[in-house]
Image (cartoon, rainbow, N blue to C red):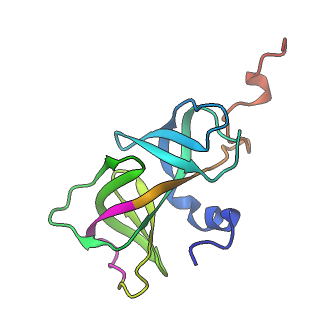
């Protein structure tokens, strides 16, 4: 099981949220676009509609993969490999059960679908290909808002 609920998943993995730049989104679309580690990434928004506006945000990037492979070198990268597909390389920073957190320039919380796969030790460099879609959990800012706007930021004339 990857998550009991979106809220439980966020609570467990929030310390591995990535600092990203969210872009404006199309009205009603469940997709978010963000800049993460210099790459434009499309995410399936798991935070709910209308909860995240454009701008700098903390987002848990959650990917599913068949397996992790040992990396041939120790560089960190995140690159688009097709619509909703990513290829990542980075250092393992945490793991629990079938979930491994990999620093690819930004943290990516990776669910490994192969139940027989042995986890890689922290510090080990791995590479992976994501099974689409990549999920995104937008965290609320310090005020509790996911949009980053406070009441003082809104136009009172509206």
Q: At x 30% / y 71%, what residue is drawn?
A: 123
Q: Quadrant of the C terminus?
A: top right
Residue at position x 34%, y 39% in the image: 38
Magenta stretch containing residue 129, yes or no? yes
Where 127 falls versus 52 (above or below)? below
Q: Nearer the viewer, residue 77 or 64?
A: 64
| Above/below status of 76 relative to 57 | below
Q: Is residue 142 left or right of residue 83?
A: right
Figure disc tally: 0
Which of 109/117 is in front? 117
Which residue shows up at 70% across the image and 30% down it?
149
Residue located 42% across and 57% down the image: 107
Q: Quadrant of the rendered structure where residue 142 is?
A: top right
Up-down relation of residue 38 to residue 79 (above or below):
above
Indicate left or right for 58 with 132 as reference: right
| Residue 84 % position (x, y) | 42, 50
Q: Which residues are magenta?
A: 119-130
Q: Is residue 144 shown above or below 8?
A: above
* Name of the residue lying farthest toward the bottom: 116
Front in this rendered view, residue 134 or 124: 134
Quadrant placement of the N terminus? bottom right
Q: Is residue 51 magenta?
A: no
Residue 131: x percent and y percent?
Answer: 41, 62
- Residue most extreme to the top: 157
Residue 77 at x, y percent in the picture: 28, 51
Q: Position of residue 97 (x, y in %)?
A: 49, 81
């Amino acid at each position: 099981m990857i998550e009991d609920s979106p809220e439980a998943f966020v609570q467990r993995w929030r310390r591995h949220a990535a600092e990203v730049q969210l872009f404006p989104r199309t009205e009603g679309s469940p997709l978010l676009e963000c800049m993460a580690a210099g790459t434009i990434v499309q995410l399936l928004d798991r935070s709910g509609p209308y909860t995240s506006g454009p701008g700098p945000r903390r987002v848990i990037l959650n990917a599913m993969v068949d397996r992790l492979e040992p990396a041939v070198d120790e560089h960190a990268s995140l690159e688009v490999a097709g619509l909703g597909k990513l290829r990542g390389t980075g250092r393992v920073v945490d793991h629990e059960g079938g979930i491994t957190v990999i620093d690819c320039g930004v943290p990516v919380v990776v669910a490994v679908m192969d139940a027989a796969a042995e986890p890689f030790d922290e510090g080990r460099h791995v590479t992976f290909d994501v099974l689409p879609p990549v999920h995104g959990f937008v965290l609320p800012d310090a005020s509790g808002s996911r949009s980053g706007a406070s009441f003082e930021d809104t136009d009172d004339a509206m």
